[in-house]
Amino acid sequence: MAPDWWKPKADDGPPPKKSARRWRDKFKEAFRGVKLGVRGHSSFSVHFFFTALVVAAALVLGLGWTEWCLILLCVGAVITSELFNSAIETLFHGLDPESKSRIHGCLDIAAGAVLVASLTAALVGTLVFLRKLLILFHFIHEPNQW
């Protein structure tokens, strides 16, 4: 049996309709979220440093379209995982001590996701740049490109 506060009252009408948000507002909120995530957490400075380093190396070595796509996907995956980690940390810090003690493992899992994304990106970057360097120093021949 449902408690009294749960039962709908006779004078309750349908819930009020929410007005649709404009796309401009959705993007504004999303950009604000990225800004909050980046500003609030110091680990982004490490990710941005390595992103700048990778982009500079990619420009110098003249990566092809496929290689650029791989590098940019990896950068996006790392930054996205870091934003999710930041969101979970922000939620965690707003909890009461009892709740924090029950779900402390969530922080470790989120940090683990960032670690996996970062290690995967490092592996892909190593393979892409190593191949390009081996071609540059004539240790291997570049296959015919069409």
Image (tube, rainbow, N blue to C red):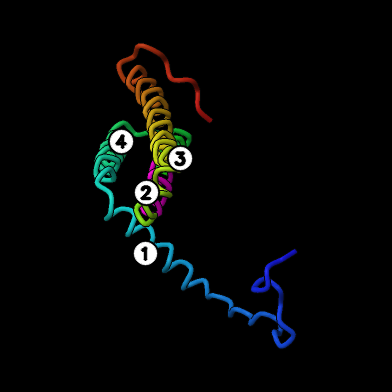
Does dot 2 land on a helix, a strand or a loop? helix
Residue 71 can be seen, yes or no: no
Q: Residues within 10 Å of mark 1 (few under 14, many from 20)?
A: few
* x 29%, y 45%: residue: 44
The CA distance from mark 1 to mark 3 is: 22 Å
Residue 141 at x, y = what percent?
42, 15
* x 32%, y 59%: residue: 35
Identify which amino acid the numbered label 3 is placed on: Leu
Residue that mark 2 sits on: 89
Residue 81 falls within the magenta-colored stretch: yes
Does dot 3 land on a helix, a strand or a loop? helix
Tag in front: 2 or 3: 2
The CA distance from mark 2 to mark 4 is: 28 Å
Does dot 1 land on a helix, a strand or a loop? helix
Identify which amino acid the numbered label 4 is placed on: Val
Identify which amino acid the numbered label 1 is placed on: Arg
Residue that mark 4 sits on: 54
Mark 4 or mark 3: which comes first in sequence?
Answer: 4
The CA distance from mark 2 to mark 3 is: 24 Å
Residue that mark 1 sits on: 32
